[in-house]
Image (cartoon, rainbow, N blue to C red):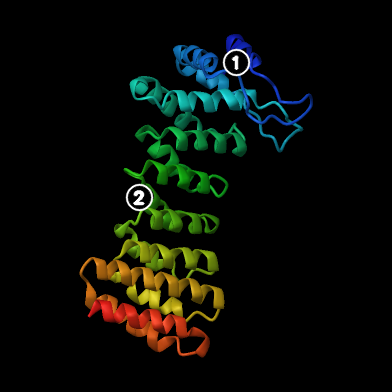
Amino acid sequence: MQAPDPRVAELVGQLPNSDQPDAESKFTGPPWATVEKMCAEILAGGRERLVALVGLLRDPSRERWTSFRAEYLLHAIALYVGARERRVERRLFVETLASLIGDAAESKAVRTRLIEELQTTGGWGALDALGGALLDADLCEPAARALVALRRGAAGRVRAALPKAPAACRAALAQALGVLADAEAVGALIEILGDRNREVRICAVWALARTGDARGIDGVLAAVAADDGWESAQAVKAAFLLAEKLAAAGAKQEAARIYTHLGARCSDPAEKHIRAAAERGLEAAE
C-alpha cells in the first residue's frame, strides 16, 4: 500500500466514530448530501485516493477496533457510484478494488470487505479478480456471492474454478452454479456428486436440478438412495425440482421417469406424501 493521504484521513476523521463513546460503530453517519461531497472528493483524486482509503481499513479480529469510519466511507462510495450518470466513477472504483483483491499484503478480512463492496456495485471489470478469489478458501464464498450478483460472465468463472478449487470451496461454487442455473456446468457438477463432503454433494444435486438438464437425472436419482436421511431428503426435493423443470420445458418423458422412480423408491408409509406428489406429477406429465 502507498503512503497515507492526509486529505483522505481528514475526510474519514469528519465522520462520527460511533453512536456512543467507546461503543461499536453502527454505520450511522451525516446527511447523505454531506457524504456525497466526500465521495466525490475521494473519486476526484483517482486511484491513488481510493487506495489510500482502503489503506485505512482494518482487520477487526487483530485488535479491538471500534472505528469503522473508513469502512463507512468506502461503502458510501460503492452506493454513490451506482448512479447511472456516474459510470466513469464506477469503473474507476470497481477496477481499483478488483486490483487489490489479490494483494497478499492485505488481510483476508480487508479483502473480503473489498469483495463485498464489488458485490454492491457490480461491474465487469471485477470478473477476473473475483474468479481468482474463488480458489482461496477464505475468499471463495464472498467472491461467489459477488459473481452471482454480477450474473453476466459469472458462470464461466465459477465453472472454471470448480475442478481446481480446494475442498473447502466446492460447496459454495456448486451452490453458485445452481443459482446461475448454468447448464454448461452439468458435467462438472456430476463429477463432484461423489465428493467426500456431504454439503458438497447436496449442493451439487440441487445445482443439477436447477439446470433443468436431463443429463443430471441419473445423478439426482442416485442421491435419493443416500444412506443419510438428510441428504436423501434434499435429493428428493431436488428430484422434484428437476422433474418440474423438465416437464415445463416439454421433456415430459424424462419428467415421468423421475416421478416413477420417486413413487417406487419411497415405499415407506411415512413417505406417502412423496408418493402422492409423484403420482400427481406423473399425471400432469402424461
The label nearer to you, 1 versus 2, is 2
Q: Is residue 2 left or right of residue 213?
A: right
- Residue 178 % position (x, y): 40, 58
Q: Name the quarter where the C terminus is drawn.
A: bottom left
Between 257 and 169, the one lying in front of the other is 257
Tell me the distance, in whole angstroms, between the alpha carbons under discs 1 and 2: 38 Å
Residue projecting furthest to the right? 22
Q: What residue is at 46 percent from the left and 47 percent from the top?
A: 144
The numbered disc on residue 215 is: none
The numbered disc on residue 155 is: 2
Q: Secondary structure at mark 1?
A: loop
Taking the image as drawn, is residue 102 in sight?
Answer: no
Residue matched to label 1: 3
Q: Name the quarter where the N terminus is drawn.
A: top right
Identify whether 116 is placed above or below 219. above
**Neighbourhood count class around disc 1 (C-alpha, 10 Å): few under 14, some 14–19, many 20 upward:** few
Q: What residue is at 66 percent from the left and 34 percent from the top?
A: 59
Residue projecting furthest to the left? 250
Q: Secondary structure at mark 2?
A: helix
The type of residue carrying mark 2 is: Ala
Between 202 and 280, the one lying in front of the other is 280
